[in-house]
């Protein structure tokens, strides 16, 4: 902390996690992944929201990183992710959870999460995933890729369907990743660069976000809220 | 009952005998515009040579003076003379004519249409052929017989009952009245005045007795309103009145005969009205009364409208009296059903039905008469218009009334279905029982719901519809519902139908719920077993493990197991391709972190292959454990993995370029020994070989436990 002033503004991060040991573990992992990071941690959503009201990113500081548990004592972390995404789309929201089911996964990705990490992996794995997300490579396990592929339609050439659907290239990327290939392997098979594959993945994430918003709107209309 | 039948037959035979012992001319006479016309003659009869139709002018005995025939001589019912003097004169003429016919040859004077008067000598036959008796005779005879048989039947059901006795009395009175009238009203031309007067007296006696008995009946049934002694007041008033009429000391026949008859009818109606008030709160009595009252009011009302009222209003009956007697038979049949309490619970709907049809008929007659009298329509068109008006106006109204008053469908079908589902899927037995009782209350509003003392196999109506028995359903023991609709009504067969529908829907829904609960229980059992077997074992090994890293690994595995158990994947089969994709991804990340190169080609031979969950678990554990060993101990720079589906098994190979396994790890190390056991448990085998360099692990697993025996 003594380095501030001479160096660019330090990176900030928040952790929202109700289990104390896990919270400490996540804070430590952030410290390993992003040396010099200033981490503020919360056990509940409410104090975190209060903190965010007064939080002002420092000039030139890298975007805020938020590790957010989904099931919190006073609400769903997905709501916080949604609030963060609408406040500043550059904020990197990452879900840290023990749930691996479709309902939680798509709720989080739909809310605008840019990563979905399981808390029971080992520390090295967690750190590696965090750094990749920060570099703009959203993690996409084969299982998640397969589930997204099932959820989003592939757009047939020339047709106009309601809601977002995958381009042919995106679904090719997804099915390769779903078969367990790495980004690099998928890039070689598709004869495109690693970077382009990562862009496709990010685009897929955005579409999940849009599709979940469209679903929310349809659901709201159905319930007579709109 | 046999006595009743015998007495009835004897009475009927007596009636027929009197009717056929009269002298016979064999001429059918009709009154036309104040004169008498012969309209037909019997082809074998004494007057077969009379040309018909012809006006009959007079009748003379041999050598005696001729009696000029008048239309009044043919009158059916002598009660309709305005004064007793005229009635006496009529009787005198009847005596004269009858004596002439009885006395031997007579001469009939007749007038051709051309105006020529002629005489025809006729020898009257001593007796009338039975088949010559006209239809009205038989109608009245049968009304009498039918009435007594009905009355006798009801009396035989409950011989000690005051109501049935009074009803039997009314039946006998009806027969006396009808049979007496049958003889004189269907005479050919004349019967002896003395006999006529006696028959007329019997007719009056029967009518008054009928009225007295019926009034007394409704003062005693369904609820006794007047004591038996008090009932005697009725004959005490009406029999002297009757005597005054018979002795012709009343002011006029109308006041002597029609008035008391009408008064008695009125008394019956009043008695019914009083009963209506008294039976409030007793639906059974009400149902009986509603039916009895309706029968009497419609039957007697029609008789008064068509026969008595026109006379009191100084006209002639609108309907031949003989046919009007049929109304009494209607009353009788109705009263008998009511008294016999035959399907009392269904009589209500029949009562309404008859009321509606009677209403339609009355409306049609009134419309028809109104159109003819007021608007001077022809008969044909007015009848057509009345029919149309009733058809389009009244019948829909009737349907609406029917639905309101009788059908009482308290809940549409889909609501009923929802209600049943709500009951059947109640959380607990207590909730289901409570909801079932609530539903029954909503549908039938009974004053009382009690457990049935005997088993009830199917819904049933008991005690004339006062009670509805329901079988055990919706976790509720069999029930008896008493006094439906706040005690104001009875259970009808429609309600029984509804109850059947309800019980059958409920048993379907309950079966479904039971199946659902079985499913839940099985699922809970599966989860419990998996939690104990898998998670429990992991946590125990973590708890008792010597080093922290091993404990942490066990915890991680436990969490993974929990996810798998919750997702319901245990017990299912998984695509081998997906399983391998996930393992490859996980292994690659681990290798990347350790700086080791992973060489794992993904062939397409696994497409479509499904593996059972225990096989997947063994494969995953084996691969993880093997890779962990390599990363921890082998100091390797490269790991080569291959997994293939061959025939009915999976062949996996893990090879590294490290220093090779220490001998102790290969045989006794905890992790590897566990691995060995686990693979063996599902029928596979694992082999450790020295690679050149490093180690090669070969793993053979069956696709499913069933194929384990066939492994190479």
Image (cartoon, rainbow, N blue to C red):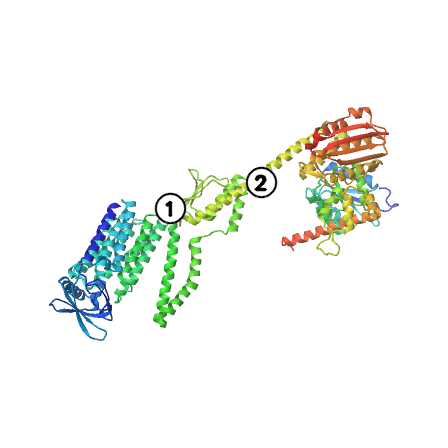
Q: Residue at x 62, y 37 (%)?
A: B523
Question: Horizontal placement of B444 versus B211: left or right?
Answer: right
Query: Alpha-carbon neighbours of circle 2 within 10 Å: few (<14), some, or many (≥20)?
Result: few
Disc sitting over residue B464 in the figure: 1
In this view, the residue farthest toward the right is A6
Up-down relation of residue B416 to residue B378 (above or below): above
Q: CA distance from mark 2 to mark 1?
A: 40 Å
Question: Horizontal placement of A213 versus B510: left or right?
Answer: right
The location of residue B382, given as percent across then percent down, is 38, 69
Q: Quadrant of residue A130 in the image? A: top right
Q: Chain of mark 2?
A: B
Q: Residue at x 36, y 62 (%)?
A: B362
Given residues B315 and A20, the one toward you in this image is B315
In this view, the residue farthest toward the left is B63
Question: Horizontal placement of B488 versus B420: left or right?
Answer: left
The location of residue B114, given as percent across then percent down, is 22, 75
The location of residue B234, given as percent across then percent down, is 23, 54
SS state under label 1: helix
Q: Is residue A135 visible?
A: no
The quadrant of the picture occupied by the C terminus of chain B is: top right
SS state under label 2: helix
Given residues B466 and B616, the one toward you in this image is B616
Disc sitting over residue B525 in the figure: none
Q: Is residue B354 visible?
A: yes
Q: Residue at x 18, y 72 (%)?
A: B118
The residue under label 2 is B516
Q: Earlier in the sequence, mark 2 or mark 1?
A: 1
């Amino acid at each position: 902390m003594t380095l501030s002033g001479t160096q660019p503004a330090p990176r900030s991060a928040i952790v929202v996690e109700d289990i104390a040991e896990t919270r400490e573990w996540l804070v430590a992992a952030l410290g390993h992944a992003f040396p010099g990071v200033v981490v503020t941690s919360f056990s509940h959503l409410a104090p975190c929201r209060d903190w965010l009201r007064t939080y002002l990113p420092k000039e030139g500081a890298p975007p805020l990183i938020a590790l957010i548990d989904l099931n919190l004592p006073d609400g769903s972390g997905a709501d916080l992710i949604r609030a963060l995404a609408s406040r500043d789309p550059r904020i990197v929201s990452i879900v840290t959870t023990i749930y691996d089911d479709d309902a939680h996964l798509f709720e989080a990705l739909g809310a605008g999460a840019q990563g979905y990490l399981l808390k029971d992996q080992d520390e090295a794995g967690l750190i590696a995933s965090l750094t990749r997300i920060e570099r703009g490579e959203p993690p996409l396990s084969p299982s998640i890729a397969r589930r997204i592929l099932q959820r989003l339609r592939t757009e047939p050439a020339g047709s106009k369907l309601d809601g977002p659907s995958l381009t042919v290239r995106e679904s090719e990327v997804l099915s390769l990743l779903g078969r367990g290939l790495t980004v690099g392997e998928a890039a070689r098979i598709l004869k495109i660069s690693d970077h382009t594959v990562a862009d496709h993945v990010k685009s897929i994430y955005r579409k999940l976000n849009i599709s979940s918003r469209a679903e929310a709107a349809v659901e709201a209309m159905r319930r007579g809220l709109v | 009952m046999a006595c009743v039948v015998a007495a009835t037959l004897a009475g009927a035979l007596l009636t027929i005998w009197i009717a056929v012992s009269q002298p016979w001319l064999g001429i059918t006479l009709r009154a036309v515009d104040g004169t008498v016309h012969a309209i037909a003659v019997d082809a074998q009869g004494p007057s077969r040579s009379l040309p018909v139709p012809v006006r009959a002018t007079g009748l003379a005995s041999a050598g005696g003076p001729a009696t000029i025939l008048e239309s009044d001589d043919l009158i059916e019912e002598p009660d309709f003379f305005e004064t007793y003097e005229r009635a006496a004169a009529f009787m005198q003429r009847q005596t004269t004519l009858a004596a002439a016919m009885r006395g031997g040859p007579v001469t009939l004077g007749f007038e051709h249409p051309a105006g020529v008067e002629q005489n025809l000598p006729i020898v009257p036959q001593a007796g009338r052929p039975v088949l010559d008796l006209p239809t009205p005779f038989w109608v009245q005879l049968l009304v009498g017989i039918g009435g007594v048989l009905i009355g006798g039947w009801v009396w035989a059901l409950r011989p000690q009952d005051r109501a049935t006795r009074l009803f039997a009395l009314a039946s006998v009175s009806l027969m006396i009245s009808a049979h007496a009238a049958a003889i004189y009203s269907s005479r050919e031309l004349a019967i002896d005045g003395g006999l006529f007067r006696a028959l007329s007296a019997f007719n009056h006696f029967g009518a008054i007795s009928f009225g007295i008995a019926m009034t007394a009946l409704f003062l005693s049934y369904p609820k006794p309103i007047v004591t038996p002694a008090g009932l005697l007041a009725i004959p005490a008033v009406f029999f002297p009145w009757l005597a005054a009429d018979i002795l012709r000391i009343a002011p006029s026949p109308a006041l002597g005969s029609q008035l008391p008859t009408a008064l008695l009818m009125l008394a019956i109606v009043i008695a019914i009205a009083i009963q209506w008030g008294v039976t409030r709160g007793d639906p059974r009595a009400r149902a009986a009364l509603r039916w009895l009252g309706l029968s009497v009011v419609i039957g007697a009302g029609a008789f008064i409208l068509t026969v008595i009222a026109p006379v009191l209003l100084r006209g002639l009956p609108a309907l031949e009296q003989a046919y009007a007697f049929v109304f009494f038979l209607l009353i009788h049949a109705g009263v008998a059903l009511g008294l016999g309490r035959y399907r009392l619970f269904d009589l209500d709907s029949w009562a309404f039905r008859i009321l509606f049809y009677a209403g339609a008929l009355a409306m049609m007659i009134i419309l028809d008469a109104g159109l003819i009298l007021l608007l001077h329509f022809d008969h044909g068109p007015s009848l057509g218009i009345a029919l149309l008006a009733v058809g389009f106006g009244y019948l829909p109204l009737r349907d609406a009334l029917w639905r309101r008053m009788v059908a009482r469908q308290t809940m549409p079908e889909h609501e009923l279905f929802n209600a049943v589902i709500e009951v059947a899927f109640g959380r607990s037995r207590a909730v289901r029982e409570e909801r079932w009782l609530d539903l029954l209350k909503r549908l039938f509003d009974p004053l009382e719901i009690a457990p049935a003392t005997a088993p009830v196999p199917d819904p049933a109506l008991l005690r004339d519809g006062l009670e509805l028995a329901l079988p055990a359903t919706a976790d509720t023991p069999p029930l008896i519902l008493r006094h439906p609709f706040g005690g104001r009504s009875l259970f009808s067969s429609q309600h029984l139908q509804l109850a059947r529908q309800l019980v059958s829907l409920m048993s379907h829904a309950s079966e479904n719920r039971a199946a659902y609960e079985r499913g839940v229980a099985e699922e809970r059992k599966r989860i419990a077993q998996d939690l104990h077997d898998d998670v429990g074992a992991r946590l125990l090994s973590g708890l008792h493990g010597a080093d922290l890293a091993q404990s942490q690994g066990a915890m991680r595995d436990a969490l993974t197991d929990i996810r798998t158990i919750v997702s319901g994947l245990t017990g299912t089969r998984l695509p081998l391709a997906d399983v391998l994709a996930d393992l490859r991804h996980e292994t690659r990340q681990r290798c990347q972190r350790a700086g080791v190169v992973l060489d794992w080609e993904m062939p397409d031979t696994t497409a479509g292959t499904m593996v059972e969950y225990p096989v997947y678990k063994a494969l995953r554990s084996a691969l993880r454990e093997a890779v962990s060993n390599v990363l921890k101990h082998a100091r390797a720079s490269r790991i080569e993995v291959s997994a293939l589906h061959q025939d009915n098994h999976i062949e996996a190979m893990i090879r590294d370029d490290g220093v090779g396994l220490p001998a102790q790890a290969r045989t006794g190390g905890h992790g590897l020994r566990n691995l060995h056991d686990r693979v063996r448990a599902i029928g596979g085998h694992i082999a450790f070989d020295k690679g050149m360099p490093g180690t090669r692990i070969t793993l053979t697993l069956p696709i499913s436990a069933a194929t384990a025996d066939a492994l190479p």
